[in-house]
Image (cartoon, rainbow, N blue to C red):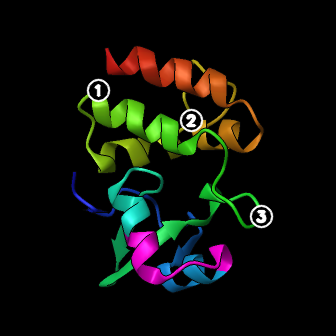
Amino acid sequence: MNELAPVALSDDVAVLSVADVAQMLSIPVSRVHQMVRDGHLLSVRRDGAVWVPSDFFDGAAPVKGLSGTIMLLRDGGYADADILRWLFADDPSLPSSPVSMLRAGRHREVKRRAQAMAF
């Protein structure tokens, strides 16, 4: 998979630099890049720099269910840019955007929706 998706988010989505993510998670920057390659996180490139959406974190950890959702959609053939767009777009089959639902602890519902999309 492409580690750096083309810009697929509006500019109003808050992002963190890879260095900030590494510091927050107390891991090396190289490990953040590995997390993106492995599908635990997604990143975007803005103005030549790599960023990770801040909504992907709950405190000092990735939001529960995020990596499983990313993997389901990757396995279903979705590109990272499409996954990013879906995570942040209002979904008529959900009460709000998938990332908001994940942050609210409703990861099973989001995964069911992602699984349906992947087939």
Q: Quadrant of residue 26?
A: bottom right
Q: Is residue 52 above or below residue 80?
A: below
How would you rate the neighbour count of disc 2 (Cα within 10 Å): few for under 14, some for 14-19, many for 20 or more?
some
Give, as a single range, the part of the protein colored magenta.
24-33
Q: Quadrant of residue 15?
A: bottom right
Mark 1 vs mark 3: which is more N-terminal? 3
Judge whether residue 2 is colored magenta.
Answer: no
* Label 3 – label 2 distance at C-alpha: 24 Å
Q: Amino acid at mark 3?
A: Gly
Residue at horizontal 54 percent and vertical 28 percent from the top: 91
**Of labels 3 and 2, the one closer to you:** 3
Q: Quadrant of residue 92?
A: top right
Question: Which residue is the site of mark 1?
Answer: 76
Q: What is the secondary structure assignment of the residue under circle 2? A: loop
* Label 2 – label 1 distance at C-alpha: 20 Å
Q: What is the secondary structure assignment of the residue under circle 1? A: loop
Query: Which residue is at the front of the view, 6 or 106?
Result: 106
